[in-house]
Image (cartoon, rainbow, N blue to C red):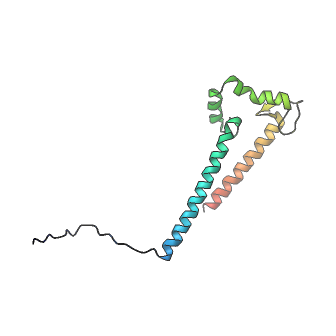
Amino acid sequence: MKRTAIPTNTPTVEVLTPSEADKLRDSQGMKLIDKLVQEKVAEVLAARDQFLFEPFFRSRQEAYEIRRLQTVPERKVWAVRFERRGCLLCKTKERPHGAIGFCAPCYAKVGQELKAIVSELMKAQAGAGK
């Protein structure tokens, strides 16, 4: 019978039983995966109705690109809604339409509020990253 030598650079496989630390890591990993899945589901559900509000909540450049792709009726929907029902915030029809269903003063007010919220969130995110 001929003997064959096993090369020394052959990888070896070692079977280990999971330790308590591995179990804990797996548990935390599953929590992270669950959290990410829940966030993704929320994003998908929000995106499904998002097209109604385009170009709502977009940067100026994104809003311009969306408007360029929209049909004329899609571009006029907020102005017509304003004519029929008034401002989304104050309900008046007396002032001129500003944008996205708001009269000019309410549009400015909501814009300032949203910018302040974004600023707060950015500061909170920067503080959490420390």
Instruction: Give percent across and percent down for residue 128.
Output: 63, 61
Front residue of 95/73: it is: 73
Furthest toward the front, the residue is 1
Left or right of 120 on screen, residue 13 = left
Which residue is painted at 81% across and 41% down in the image? 109
61 up-or-down from 34: above or below: above
Instruction: Give percent across and percent down for residue 79.
Output: 78, 28
- Asked if one can make out residue 96 in the rendered structure from this viewpoint, the answer is no
Instruction: Give percent across and percent down for residue 26.
Output: 51, 67
Left or right of 51 on screen, residue 101 = right
Specify the quadrant of the image occupied by residue 68: top right
11 up-or-down from 91: above or below: below
35 up-or-down from 104: above or below: below
The quadrant of the image that shows the N terminus is: bottom left
Furthest toward the bottom, the residue is 20
Furthest toward the top, the residue is 72
Which residue is painted at 79% across and 38% down in the image? 108
Specify the quadrant of the image occupied by residue 130: bottom right
Which residue is painted at 73% across and 50% down in the image? 117
